[in-house]
DNA sequence: GCAAATTAATGATTTATTCAAG
DNA sequence: CTTGAATAAATCATTAATTTGC
C-alpha cells in the first residue's frame, strides 16, 4: 500500500536542521508570512505544510523551556543544599568558602549561573539571521510603568522602615531555602488542585 | 525606528523563574535593599532595573491573590454541587471529551474560525496573510478534527501584529545557509517525570 | 538477523492562563 | 470587570528507537 495513512508529518533531517538553525538564530513565533516562506523553502526537502512549521516552533519552544526549567530547578535545589537557609543577611559574594561543593558543580557562585542556553546571551555579531532580542517569550511582558531609574527606591523606601506587621521576612536570603512547590518539574507532586480531567 | 519603543522590561525566562521561586519561598514585598540585591543578581541574565523587580512583586502578589480567590470560589461551588447531587451522574468515561465546568463561560471548542484564505497562487508577497476582517464568516465547520491544510494561518494571523516587545524579525531572510549539524540538544536522556499516565 | 514488544521522541490538540481593549 | 486575542502548558497519539526472544 503506497498510501500510507501518514497522519503526521515526518520531517526530513534537512528540514529539522534548518528549523533548528532558525530557532537558534532567535526565531520563536514566526508569523503567517514567515511561516509561508519557511514552508516554501523546506518543501524542497520534502512534503511539508504551514501548520507543521507552526507546530514545530510551538513544540520546540515549549520543550526547550521545559528542559531549561528542569535544569534550573535542579540547580536550585543543589544550591539550596549548599546554602544555609538560615542566613538573614544578604549573602556575601564570596561563596568560595563553601565547605563542600558538590563534585559536579563548577559553579562558584551562590546562585544559578549555569543555565546559559546558547541564545540567552546576546552575542552581537554571530547572528546570521535577524537575531532578535533573544528574550524568548516566557513571561512576555510585565508592566514597566513610568518610573525613572531611581525613583523606585523612593516608592518603597518606607518599606524598609515598615512595622514588622507587613514585613514577611526581614531579609530572607534571596534564594529560596525551602522547595515549597516546585511545580512538577523536579520534585514530584503534580499539582492536583482542581483538575479533574479524566483523560 | 532606531528607538525601540521598548517601554517595558522583558524579563528573560531565567529571571522570571528566579523571581517566581523567590515568591514561592515567601517573599512578597522586598525592601529596597533586597530589591537591590535581587536586581544585581538578575542582571546577570539580562537588562533589568530595580523598578522592574518592585513592580513584578506587586503585580504577582495581586494576581496570585486573585487567582487563589477564584479557585477557592470554584472549589467551593464544586463542593456544594457534590454535596447536593441532583442527579446520579456517574463519571463520564467517554473517551471523547469531557466538558469541564467553565467558570466564565469560556467556550473551549472554538478555535479561530477558519478563514480559509487560500493563497490562490498568490505570491508570497508577505502581505498580511490573514488580514481578512471580514466577509467570509463561514465558520461552519468546527475544527474538532484539527487544523485543515490552510487553517493554520488563522491561528497565527494575529501574530502579524505581534507585541512590539518581542517582535522578532520582520522580513529577514529566513535561511541561514549554514548547516551546522550541531544539535544543542542531544536528547538529554530521561523523559518527563510524571506527565505520562492513563494511556 | 528479524520482528514483536517496549520505550522514548515528538507531532498535533486541547485546555488554562495572560494581556489588554472596551 | 468583562471579554476577545494570543500564548503557553498540558495532554493525546503516532512514529522512531531500542530491547528482547527466537
Image (cartoon, coloured by chain):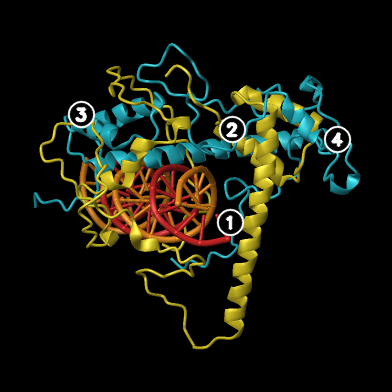
Chain colours: A cyan, B yellow, C orange, D red
Residue tagged by mark 3?
Answer: A41
On residue B14, the disc is: 2
Please report whichever mark, 3 or 4, sits nearer to the chain's N-terminal start. Answer: 3
On residue A160, the disc is: 4
Residue drawn at x 31%, y 42% as measured from the top left: B157
Please report whichever mark, 1 or 4, sits nearer to the chain's N-terminal start. Answer: 4
Q: Is mark 2 on a helix, strand or loop?
A: helix
Q: Where is residue B74 in the image (x, y as percent from the top left)?
A: 59, 68
Q: Is residue A182 visible?
A: yes
Depth check: B182 or A136 in front?
A136
Compared to residue B57, the image places residue B167 above or below, namely above
Distance in Å between CA atoms under marks 1 and 4: 37 Å
Q: Quadrant of the N terminus of chain B?
A: top left
Please report whichever mark, 3 or 1, sits nearer to the chain's N-terminal start. Answer: 3
As drawn, is A165 to the left or to the right of A143?
Answer: right
Label 3 vs label 1, nearer the camera: 3
Residue tagged by mark 1?
Answer: A190
Label 1 vs label 2, nearer the camera: 2
Q: Position of residue A31 (x, y in %)?
A: 32, 36
Q: Image quadrant of residue B66?
A: bottom right
For mark 4, does the 10 Å Cα neighbourhood hold few (<14), some (14 to 19), or many (20 or more) residues? Answer: some
Compared to residue B103, the image places residue B191 above or below, namely above
Label 1 vs label 4, nearer the camera: 4
Residues at discs 3 and 2 in contact (Cβ within 8 Å): no
Amino acid at each position: 500500500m503506497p498510501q500510507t495513512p501518514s497522519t503526521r508529518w515526518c520531517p526530513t533531517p534537512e528540514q529539522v536542521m534548518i528549523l533548528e538553525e532558525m530557532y537558534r538564530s532567535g526565531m520563536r513565533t514566526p508569523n503567517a508570512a514567515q511561516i509561508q516562506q519557511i514552508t516554501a523553502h523546506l518543501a524542497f526537502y520534502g512534503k511539508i505544510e504551514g501548520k507543521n512549521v507552526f507546530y514545530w516552533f510551538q513544540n520546540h519552544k515549549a520543550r526547550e523551556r521545559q528542559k531549561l526549567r528542569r535544569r534550573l530547578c535542579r540547580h536550585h535545589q543543589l544550591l539550596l543544599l549548599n546554602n544555609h537557609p538560615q542566613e538573614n543577611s544578604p549573602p556575601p559574594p564570596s561563596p568560595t568558602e563553601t565547605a563542600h561543593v558538590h563534585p559536579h558543580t563548577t559553579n562558584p557562585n551562590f546562585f544559578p549561573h549555569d543555565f546559559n542556553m546558547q541564545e540567552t546571551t546576546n552575542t552581537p555579531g554571530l547572528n546570521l539571521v535577524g537575531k532578535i532580542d533573544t528574550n524568548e517569550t516566557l513571561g512576555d511582558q510585565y508592566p514597566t510603568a513610568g518610573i525613572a531609574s531611581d525613583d523606585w527606591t523612593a516608592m518603597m523606601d518606607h518599606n524598609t522602615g515598615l512595622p514588622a506587621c507587613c514585613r514577611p521576612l526581614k531579609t530572607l536570603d534571596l534564594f529560596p531555602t525551602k522547595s515549597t512547590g516546585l511545580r512538577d518539574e523536579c520534585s514530584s507532586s503534580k499539582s492536583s488542585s482542581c483538575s479533574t480531567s479524566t483523560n
